[in-house]
Amino acid sequence: MSTIKATFASKCLARPTDIYVVLPDQNPPPGSSSYYQRPAKTLLLLHGYSGIATDWLLNAPAQPLAAKYNLAIVTVSGENSFYLDQKGTGRKYGTFVGEEVLEYVRNTFKIALNRQDTFVGGLSMGGFGALRTAFAYPENFSGCIALSSALIHNQVMTMTPDNTQGAPADYDYYASTFGEPSQLANSVNNPEFLVKKLKADGKEMPKIFMACGTEDSIMVENRRFRDFLLSENVRVKFQEAPGIHNWDFWCQHIGPGIEYLLGNDA
């Protein structure tokens, strides 16, 4: 098992950036499962609002998961971007996670070599980012794990400079992150718009796993998005269980999410 910190010059962010890569052992561990009878798959994991690249490494069992499932895990820092392309030089966070990071790890580590072997996941803001990335780059990702996703796009649509609908940040933050709120309904920053576009274009949908705690304040938005996906005939598994917006819940559900994408869920 290897955990590697790599620094490369990102064109999307216009600066050097650090990523972390957890690589499973090339030789199967004693008693290893059928996961080692195929090449390692890759999971790009996205942190939440105010998080950093090491969150998944320090707070979740990233290394044991990589070993158990023969899975390379890649983590990045997306700042508070919701993993969206924004105006201005060095702010293409969507392209960064959807294309540039994959290109780098393919060339450097020889992982994530094809769509079927590449997944994206995240929590909270990163859950939104994982869903949006999977639908924006379906040619790169075959599956998505979205935990306690901050699916705030419908809330953002109704914001005005004088009314942010009780959101914790100010209007300028949401407008610069998502684009003009009044135009978000038909924007590539809206995962619902992307789903409808994928269907219209006849492209293959990624496989989706969602989970949210029943005591989490964003459960309503997660159930609503699940219902939207089902109405669009998108394949989705949705788990809800007692829990709040914390690492205890996310650590309990990342494993089931991986197993679902690998086709071994119950």
Image (cartoon, rainbow, N blue to C red):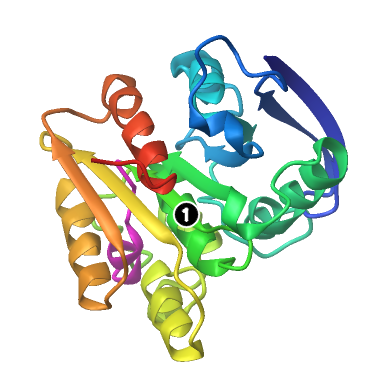
Q: Residue at x 73, y 47 (%)?
A: 101
Image spot of residue 37 (x, y percent): 59, 34
Please tell me which residue lies in front, 183 or 230.
230
Q: Is residue 104 left or right of residue 112?
A: right
Evaluate whether residue 201 shows in this view.
Answer: yes
Task: Report which quarter residue 147 is drawn in.
Answer: top left
Q: Residue at x 73, y 41 (%)?
A: 111
Image spot of residue 139 (x, y percent): 62, 68
**Is residue 244 positioned above or below 115 on the image?**
above
Q: Magenta residues?
A: 148-158
SS assignment at label 1: strand
Quadrant where the C terminus sits is top left
Task: Report which quarter residue 76 is drawn in.
Answer: top right
Q: Residue at x 24, y 57 (%)?
A: 165
Image spot of residue 108 (x, y percent): 86, 38
Please tell me which residue lies in front, 225 or 257.
257
| Residue occupied by mark 1 | 143
